[in-house]
Amino acid sequence: MKTNLSPKLFLFACILVSTIACGKKKDADPDKPDTTPPIVIPPVVSPPVYTGTSMIVESLSGPVTSNETIAFKNYIYNKISAPATNDGNIWVYGNSGKQIEACGLMYETTHDIAILDRMIYLCDAALAGRNDLASAVNGGQRTIWTGSIEPVWPSSKPEVLVQQAGVEQGQILSHMAFCSLLILQNPSIWNNTVGIGDSKGFGATYKARALKYITEADYVMDKWILPRFIRTTDNNRYYFPGAPNDYKPNEPAPWNQAWMLTNGFVRLVQCHTILGDDANRITRYDAIVKPNIDWFFANMKPNTSKSGSACYLFAYAYPSGTEDANHFAYDVEGVWIAYNSGRYGLTKAQIMPLANTYFDIVLATVTNGIYAGKIDGTTGSGNSGGDDYVRDEYIYLTEFRPEKFEEVGNIEINKNKIASSPQITGRLLWAKNRRK
């Protein structure tokens, strides 16, 4: 007998037919209906298949569409993967760190669990790559400038004898705490098993995974940040220690790095507040965050754009100089995270001059297609060399200048940033959805 079934399926069919036949009573009355319960064969469930490699923005108005969500999801599953180490600070401000943020914003927007699972995949990889947790073969166990193997993510290349790490570590903690925060804000998923499994032993359920990230982030704060970078004699401000540290010894942290650390504290406070599990830690973190935010704004000097809007001038690092448009983006991100937490008294009126500084000075000053590289409207080189697009963190400022959203969106579209930049596309779609 010829059949199109595979040998295994054919054998299964024969067994099934035999089982049904044997299951009928031999003395069944042919005139009565057969009441034998039907055999139900459960469907074979296959894991989702994600296809497509380009993200899209179908419109700059209205809610995020299903096509936009699908395209974003396809991209993050097909085109991004976790790096082996933090070399070059890729988990801090590189693509991998930004991709965690993008996944978080898109999960916040769509509540698509597959997007959260991809965020968890990245956070798992980041945590597993921490210097004290990763094996030497996997890039860990490096000696930091302290002379010890510390719970940090070194930024130096492997061959560098003395490895560097500082307050920027707070940004990695912030990424992981963002994932925890999103989980804790959605208790309906707490007891569900994480869709990607638990290959690293970080917690089988979503809540367990969230708690693991929080515990490990607090550990880094306790063992790395608090003993070295908080000047308790100067209102808990962020300063680098002296020798053996040779990076800005005894100097204040540049504002962008300061905000990276503040981000970690803020999100951990938000997590502990939901959990209600550590009032003393919340108090301690708040007592660090608030004076550093106040210090930043106390160093703002008033400025006025050509259009007459109120703006700010401030330094890259206290006490002097001019902030560049590269690092300004991280200042903006930090201000947004603190403002959005609702904890530290920041107001729209206080933040508006920052938005004006970007939109009415940086973005309004164009030379040969390049926007100003500094917040005073001038352009230099390197970090102050300017951009021809809008850095993803600046998209937060459309919250305060909503009339600028479409201008920003069109710049990104015209510069072909949508198809392959999750951090830009994710933030843009998130911001669009908030406007609907």
Image: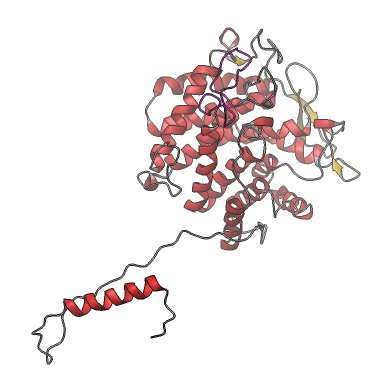
Q: Residue furthest front?
A: 1
In this view of the protein, which residue sits in the foreground, 270 or 140?
140
Answer whether residue 336 is visible to the viewer in this image: yes
Position in image of residue 347 (x %, y %):
60, 33
In this picture, residue 260 sits left or right of residue 357 = left
In this view of the protein, which residue sits in the foreground, 335 or 271?
271
Which residue is rendered at x = 66% and y = 58% of the image? 56
Q: Residue furthest bottom?
A: 31
Position in image of residue 329 (x %, y %):
71, 35
In this view of the protein, which residue sits in the foreground, 3 or 247?
3
Q: Which residues are magenta?
A: 131-153
Q: Is residue 314 magenta?
A: no
Residue 296 lies in quadrant: top right
In this picture, residue 352 sits left or right of residue 133 = right
Task: State whether the magenta stretch is mostly helix, strand or loop.
Answer: loop
In this picture, residue 240 sits left or right of residue 411 = left
Residue 78 lies in quadrant: bottom right
Above or below, comparing residue 154 to residue 31 in the picture: above
Position in image of residue 21 (x %, y %):
20, 80
Residue 298 lies in quadrant: top right
